[in-house]
Image (cartoon, coloured by chain):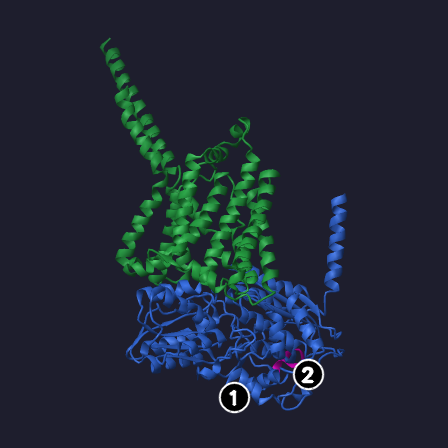
Amino acid sequence: MQRSRIIGVITALTLTAVACGGGGGGETTPTTTGTGTEGPTGTGPLAEFGESTDADPALIEKALGPVEPSDEASWNIILAAIARARQDVDQATIDKAMECFNNQECDTGTGGSIVMGYADGGGDTVNVWRAVSHMEAILQALTYPEIGTIVSTEANFDPDPAVHANDIRFLITRGADFIVGYPDMGVAIADAIKEADEAGIPYASFSAGWVGLPDQEGALIPGEDYLTVVGEDLCALGQSFAQVLVDGVGTGKVAVLGGTPGNALSLGWQRCAVGDLQAADGIELVNPPPNEDTTTGDTSWYDPIIPDVYRGLLTSDPDIKGWAYEYSDGMHTGLQVYEELGIPVEDLTVALRTDEQTLFCDWAERNEPTYNIFYSAGGNFQSRVGVTAAMLALKDASVVPAEIVVPHVMREVTAADCDPDRVNPYVSGTSLVPDEILQLMFAN
Amino acid sequence: MSTQRAPSSALTAFVVASRYMPVFIAIGVLLVVAMIWAPATLGSVPLRAIAPLAAVLAIAALGQMLVIMTGGIDLSVPGTMSLAAVIMVGVGQQTDERVLTAILIAIGGAAIVGLVNGILIGGLKLNPLIVTLAVGQVATGAVFRYGRSFAVQNPVPTGWSEWVTTRIVGVSAVFWIGLALTIVLGLGLRYTTVGRRFQAVGANPVASHAVGVRVNLNQILAYVVAAVFYAAAALALAGIIRRPGAFVGTQYLLAPIAAVVIGGASLTGGQASAVATFAAAVFLTGLNQMMRIMGLPTALQFVVFGLVIIGGMLVSGDRIIRGVEYALRRRRHLDRPQVQTERGALDGTREGGA
């Protein structure tokens, strides 16, 4: 009797909590009631949605380098996102951003009815790149007065896909109106993402976080099964990596590395890079090549694992002359294996995506003329693009393409790329998070 | 009579000794496999490179061994190790002067985790599987919270890293420390009163209690000392990889248990060998390295690693003893009817002759 009464009370409380838990999954009409940080007033092709594409060219250059614009629909959203990436944030915004960063849920103080969900397969305590991308998304959300609540989850690279899927499901039940995230588990969490979509909750992945590549079994289709995927053209990125290695190495052995096993980002560029590398005369790929579902050189982008992978490759092939990898700081971690194995860091070409200062400053310090690094961009700001794309979709999903292509260009590292005064050496130089906030994020 | 017992005793002695033998056979097999498919694994430089990692696993496994000897199990290893490593980064603040403070706090924090485990398991007799898992979660929660207060990818103080990677006779100091700990623990368990009492408690806690041994205190101490071992392993690992991050212990949930089991320990408590555990840690680390050198896909590496652990469990510990006993019993059983048949035949002959 008593037990049934308790169950009844718990059920009633649960139902009440769910009923009060937010705007509900199907809400698509944002209410602007906020008085907090305002975004830009609408100008340009997305003006009718309250977005300006009048982004500061310096910020575009900072985030992407000297790129050529991608397709118009993608580029407009990218510009709209960067236009909101103000660097002169006031103290109230800084305080609110830190509150949202440090807590799973925060009230933005605007009174907005929209609940933003942020689902990271990694997490702020896993690596700095994840933390900075999270902050980029928070700062972007704070420019929309319609967003009243930010709810963040992190799966911390848990090997169990259920943990990642549960985060998405939690955000659904919490009443998120849209979800931005990086799906480390790819197709393994497809069901949960589809549930979000079916509940009317747009899901936007960033950093080329495809929920399975188009030809992978069980893959979801962006634009149909979820809102959009923000990221580089992975095949083009892989080809750029391969070109850097072919040009830089000439004749010799090269290796490719990836992140979490089977993740779409690594798989996407590795397939195309490996094809080009195998076709090139004089280049010998030491890795077993990836197949359609399996990445190669899986480092999980995780410092304790990275040296093991480098050690495995360098032990059998100490004469590797080129590396292709997404993660600059991971390459920096891998260099300690050169030291361990007594291999000199010379006659080496490295093709990277991100641009953490650790590697670049280490490169400058080594001052080795036969050691050259090329990179594209850290891509932290892509989470901002995800937020803006989702906010656009709440107004009119048709303006958001299934794939928001972020253009890339490979740049050679020079001494100017090392900023010894950077707030934190693990933060990408291309991040758009203001220094004052980075300082607070990494206080020690 | 005596002529029948002599070979049986010798066989039994051999079988008892073989409790800890499979791991050494496994190392031999690994060497042969490596020679054939991944000879680069056996170079002096790669071996020197993995020696400290093997020692780290061994130190953590020795802690787990102490717990298993009490009939328990410790699943709080990942949380405890991560906590110790993150304290080294956070308290160390990349300053050599703070290394000692960081070490003391890390070991103290780990000891508290072990004490909580010990009190709940040894004192309150709660299930070790659930308790250590839960306490490990609490430790992980503390890591989360603490890890947010600084750049979690910061390195440990340079002085600590340099000290840990110092080589003595060409091999990492961590390896020698791990080896020394193994020998001291092995000798201590075997030749000291405390050690023998500790083993007795694990083998038969009821009998130990009956003769006045403080069983609960032994169990509590086992968890505390084990946690200190985990912290030591984590601090060494943090020094080796320099930037341990927040979850450096994650990979140490299964491996230390596997090392203890492959090392021949009895999961029901009592018997275990520190030397065999150390050897098992070397085996597992070597296997891991060999699979990477062979370029096996990550999925296959997991499968092989899991299968080897299962295989190790099948042939380690008292399974060989039981297997041989079963075979001997079966042989006797088969022999008996044969004698009866012979007797019966004789009787029949008699009957027939009657």
Please, what is the three-letter code of the amino acid marked with disc 1?
Answer: Pro
Q: Which residues are magenta?
A: A393-398
Residue closer to the observer: A237 or B65: B65
Judging from the image, what is the letter of the chain drawn in green?
A: B
Q: State whether residue A164 is above or below residue A141.
A: above
| Observer able to see residue A45 | yes
Chain where mark 1 sits: A
Which class describes the residues within 10 Å of circle 2: few (<14), some (14-19), or many (20+)? many
| Observer able to see residue B246 | no
| Residue that label 2 marks | A39
In percent of width and height, residue A88 lies at 66, 83
The secondary structure type at the circle numbered 2 is loop
User: Does residue A72 show up magenta in the picture?
Assistant: no
Q: Residue at x 35, y 28 (%)?
A: B329
In percent of width and height, residue B173 lies at 40, 55
In percent of width and height, residue B46 lies at 33, 60
Point out which mark residue A69 bears: 1
What color is chain A drawn in?
blue
Q: What residue occupies the far top of the structure in this picture?
A: B354
Q: Which of the two marks, 1 or 2, is nearer to us in this view?
A: 2
Q: What residue occupies the far bottom of the structure in this picture?
A: A44
Q: CA distance from mark 1 to mark 2?
A: 23 Å
Residue closer to the observer: B41 or A231: B41
Quadrant in which the C terminus of chain A appears:
bottom right
Which class describes the residues within 10 Å of circle 1: few (<14), some (14-19), or many (20+)? some
Q: Report which quarter residue A396 is drawn in.
A: bottom right
Q: Are marks 1 and 2 on the same chain?
A: yes
Q: What's the magenta bit mostly, secondary-structure-wise?
A: helix
User: Does residue A397 show up magenta in the picture?
Assistant: yes
